Amino acid sequence: MSNRIVVSLLAVVFGLLAGAVLMAVTGHDPIAGYSYLFEGGLKNPERIGNTLATATPLIFSGLSVAFAFRTGLFNIGVAGQLLFGGFCASAVGLSLDLPKAILLILMLIAGFAGGALWAVVPGLLKAKFNVHEVVSSIMMNWIAYWTIYYAVPAYLKGEFLETESKPLPEAASLKVNFLTEMFDGSYINLGLFVAVIAVIIVSFIINKTTFGYELKAVGHNRHAAEYSGIAVNRSIILSMAISGGIAGIGGVALYAGNASNIQIGILPTQGFDGIAVALLGANSPVGVLLSALFFGLLYSGRGFMNAMTEIPPEIADSIIAIIIYFAATSILIERLIRWLIRRKANAKSASEHEGKVK
Amino acid sequence: MWTTIAQIAPYAIVFTIPLLITALGGLFSERSGVVNIGLEGLMIMGAFAGAFTIFKLQALYPNNPYVIWIGLLAALLAGAIFSLLHAFASINLSADQVISGTAINMIAGAITIFLARNMTGSGNIRISNFVPFNIPWLTDIPIIGPLIFTKTYWTTWLVLIIVGLSSFVLYKTPFGLRLRACGEHPHAAEAAGVNVKRMRYIGVMISGAFAGLGGAIIIVTYAGEFTGSVAGLGFLALASLIFGQWKPIGVLAATLFFGIASTVANVSQVIPSLAVFPPIILKVFPYVVTLIALIVFSKSSRAPKAVGEPYDSGKR
């Protein structure tokens, strides 16, 4: 486990170094770039609030991917699950007139159900027909994309624009005054608290329950798990449903917290970033939380960096992508660590040897 | 009805071609034993390299038709070189190939726009693209003429030739046999004296080159502009590969199906005989059919047996 942490940290270091090289070869000053990037994410309470808010949907999408990973499933359909969960929650938020607390809970349930519905299809196909979940969840992404594309204008149309839904009323928003004021007008919202609770619950499920143990067993060796009496197919379907449900709640945080409506024609990039978050967080809930915060910092700081320098904002995405490449090729880093340790040992024995000769 | 079909056909073909060449590239990679989910990113990289080359050269030599061909060549090379990242990770480092491919997609999507902004000042690169033409005489052939030989592009014919050659290479040459063997029984292939790692490198690089070409063909035919995305066509190519059961002819049929389905969905609103269908049904149709096809083929999948498994010559 500690080895995984070292690998993740080194992947971050290499990613940041590669980002610096990218800035340098394109004729920019990397030190200025990074200092504006981090200032942009941390300079004052408002920026810190925005960093936390940017991280919120990433915590959910990362948790979603990590949860599926534990059962050996690659949920690449988080984008569609976010979108559909967010859509279901928005539909509830726009059509019911209830006190804020009750409405928000109903919206979270609707979001969970929508995301779970979208993910259970690849889960079923995997369990019943052994269809690879990567391809089926990519198809589900596009089905979600087009469903929202036509459903929003048809049912939730805004007053002036065809391309987005009506804004959610105050009672259906995860934004609350005390948070906005505490962070000087930031768009931080209750989604962050829901995310932290989700991290704790998922952590508990994975580490302390029989169900979590079964998931891990299936992920580790499907056939051995089957042989020892675990209902493998049930685990696969449940795991995808829960993974999608988490993503769906992420959709609520995204569309009813960070934003106040759904735009059509966009697959939320947070869905794909979830893969990066989970990978960097070594698929552990706490790791996901930390890596989502780090990515949130890069994403929320890049605007300020772009305003203060000529560096294009895509540097943040590039750094994240490179980090993922290094995390995926962790063997390279592990070899490097082993090589460094051996060299150190050799140097030590060499110096001892030298000491003896003298 | 006939006029509708004749109107749609040229667009359907133009849309099919980049999908076809990309899926064919994926076929080489997967047949050699490496899953390549990074096709989308490789297409984006090719689209960027092609658009950037053409953009720069057109400033120097306006109206020179060869410039676009040089751009396509640049895309081919850029795709092949960029695919080395995936090859190295999956072949030498035994990385999870799906994750490595995902990293390829993310890197391409981010870095190309980053570079485009640095080098041209904008995330979008506009170029003057190929102009479609009618092939003389052949257009006069009844039925086939209007369907296939009108409003066509040279790239269409180039890709069809590549498909034919690929079929020949895969099934009729020793190289093709060795490549397929590496995806089915790498240990047996090695015992027969085949360098499995080298064959897999070649497979992945061909997929990179073809996907790069596919991305650039989008730019020089119907798009005319690089925008940092290929709208999921790389993933659709991956689905076509499975739909087509890892065979060149199957891939041709599958991509043609997607080409026609997407074109029908795109033009349905302007063609009265199609406007009776709700647009959402037409848009979702190809993806739902793919899901159904995946279920149907799940019993008799022709997937290369060793695809996705890192090759370890010590393991038997």
Image: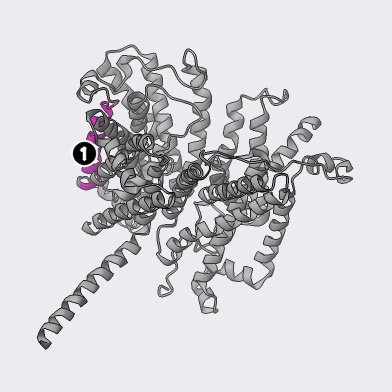
With respect to residue A49, does A173 lie above or below?
A: above
- Rendering coords of residue A212 (x, y %): 26, 46
With respect to residue B313, does A282 lie above or below?
A: above
| Most distant residue in the bottom direction | A357
Residue displayed at 51% across by 44% down: B116
Q: Nearer the viewer, residue B292 or B200?
A: B200
Left or right: where does residue B156 sit relative to residue B33?
right
Left or right: where does residue B303 sit relative to residue A77?
right
Q: Amino acid at mark 1?
A: Ile
With respect to residue A261, does B137 lie above or below?
A: below
Does B132 appear in magenta? no
User: For the magenta stretch, what is the residue range?
Assistant: A188-207
- Rendering coords of residue A187 (x, y %): 30, 25
Q: Nearer the viewer, residue B301 or B248?
A: B248
Q: Nearer the viewer, residue A169 or B55?
A: B55
Residue B255 visible:
no
Residue A95 visible:
yes
User: The N terminus of chain A appears in which quarter of the rendering?
Assistant: bottom left
Q: Which residue is mark 1?
A: A200
- Rendering coords of residue A231 (x, y %): 34, 48
Q: Quadrant of residue A201?
A: top left
Left or right: where does residue B171 sit relative to residue B84?
right
Q: Nearer the viewer, residue B286 or A213?
A: B286
Main secondary structure found in the magenta portion: helix
- Rendering coords of residue A67 (x, y %): 32, 44
* Circle 1 SS class: helix
